[in-house]
Each structure stands twice: as C-alpha cells, then as structure tokens.
Image (cartoon, rainbow, N blue to C red):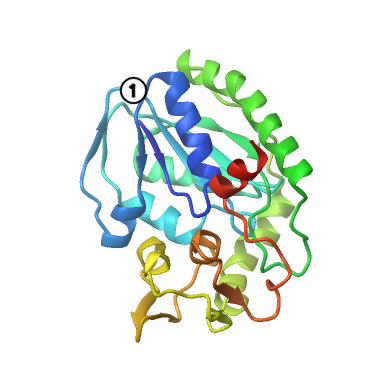
Amino acid sequence: MVLYFSATGNTEYIAKKIAEKTGDEALNLLDRIQRIDYSEIYSKKPFVICSPIYIGEMPRFFAAFLKGLKLTGNRRVYFVFTSGGYAGVASSQARMISAWKKMIYMGRAEIKMPRNYPVSKRYPMLSDAENLKRLREAVAKLPKTVARIRRGKYLWGRHIFLLEKLITVPFNPLWVKYKQPATPFYTTEKCTGCGKCAKLCPLNNITIKDNRPKWHEACAHCMACLGNCPVEAIEYGNRTQTKPKYRLSKYLKKTK
C-alpha cells in the first residue's frame, strides 16, 4: 500500500507512479488527516509512505499523524521523500516513526522535484524548462527505487551527519512557530468563494466567511490553498504577486 500526503501535486505524482509500477494501491491521507482518523489500514505488501519535505523534515503534522495511524498486515515500511533538493533529517524521523510503530524500516529514497513554495524570499521559482528537467529526472530515478521495493531490498540513502540533526531538529519547531504565519494570506477580487482552499487545508485552518476564505493561526505553509486556487486569487503578502503559482497538474497541462 502506498500512502501519501500531497499539497500541490509533487508527492501525489510520485506516489501514484510507484503504485502503478509496483501493482499496488495509492491512498491519499488528506481526508484522514483532516478528520484525525487513525483507523486501521491493512496491506499485504510492504507499506510505502510518500511525504514532502518542509524545512528539512517531514511536515510535523504528517509525522505526528503517522505515529497514530494503525497500520496492519505487512510490517515492512519504505519512505519516499519529495523536495526541492534536500530531504534534511527526514530519514531520522522515518526511523523513529518505524520504531514507534514496531515496523521494519526498509530505508528511503529522495526524489528531487520542482519547487512549489513561492513564499520563499531565498529561492526563486523555477522556469518551465527547469521544472520539466526535474520531472524527467525524477521519473528516470523511479525504476531503480521501485525495483528494490519489489524485491524487498533496502533503500540506501545518503548519511545524515550529526551536525545536520543538531541544527535542524531544534530549528524546525522555531521556524514553524515564528516564520509560518497565516495572516499574510489574502484573496484578490478574482476570488469566487468556491471554498476549494478550505477543503484542501490539512489542518482545517481555513473557513469561508461572507463567501471569502479566512485563515487562522495553525498553518503548515503547505501551499495547498495558494497552489490549487482555480482562479489564482490567493496571494501571500507582497511575496507572491509576481511569481507563478505552482501546481503540478497545471504545469503538466502547460508543458504537454
């Protein structure tokens, strides 16, 4: 069973490719996360958990949800991370989650994908050519990963140095607390009040009032709201007005 959370499409794309090539089922965990539903998921085959990377880790809400989720059947679990290029200490998280759940950790793969975080001041959004290059490289990398999963082999990844842990582990919660405010989110006159942003928020942090979305305090900066708005009506302060709103499905349509 391939389990995943995906905000703008990158992780979903990889998860479904893995499921397709392993003859397995891909299950989007968004609805369960929103409902805090830890009910049993059974799989005869090894579990493959696909996760995006936020600030050098798996999203904190997703990691917490996985710890509570009841997984039965096969006790082996693989992890596949998608990121803009650096998965940080996510493999250490994966090991701890596996141990917590008394499952057999079978390693992880790191897949480099297009950047989907237009809020960043440091990293610019990529060109269509670079996005296409990254997608082709990601797809080209998958057969080797899938082959090892199918054969029950361990997925080897790069070594995580102690310095990375010492920097990332204490830094991440501080960043989440102080550097991910939701207050700068707003909608332009293009907003139709469709409510899609509220339906896609994993933390139920958006409510619709007077036909417009309202953001509250709990925000993971996953960009599901901004990236999936059908009319591109959502902005974040003055950081996103001139940047493309990344969503994989929209990108693929443009580059066919």
Q: Is residue 171 above or below residue 93?
A: below
Q: Quadrant of the N terminus?
A: top left
Q: Quadrant of the C terminus?
A: top right
Identify the residue under disc 1. Answer: 45
Say which of 224 and 167 sits in front.
Answer: 224
**Which secondary structure, mark 1?**
loop
Residue at left 62%, top 28%?
139
Disc count in the image? 1
- Residue 31 percent across, percent down from the top left: 30, 54
Q: Is residue 97 above or below residue 181?
A: above
Res. 104 image quadrant:
top left
- Residue 36 percent across, percent down from the top left: 27, 60
Res. 92 image quadrant:
top right
Say which of 116 and 45 sits in front.
Answer: 116
Q: Is residue 179 visible?
A: yes
Tell which residue pokes out farthest to the top in this image: 151
Q: Residues within 10 Å of mark 1 (few under 14, many from 20)?
A: some
Left or right: where 26 falls relative to 59: left
Say which of 47 and 5 sits in front.
Answer: 5
Q: Is residue 27 above or below residue 147?
A: below
Residue at left 59%, top 19%?
143
Question: In the rendered structure, which amino acid carries the disc numbered 1?
Answer: Lys
Residue at left 49%, top 54%?
7
- Residue 232 percent across, percent down from the top left: 56, 66
Left or right: where 218 falls relative to 39: right
Tell which residue pokes out farthest to the left in this image: 39
Q: Is residue 79 visible?
A: no
Say which of 160 and 1 sits in front.
Answer: 1
Left or right: where 81 falls relative to 98: right
- Residue 93 percent across, percent down from the top left: 52, 48
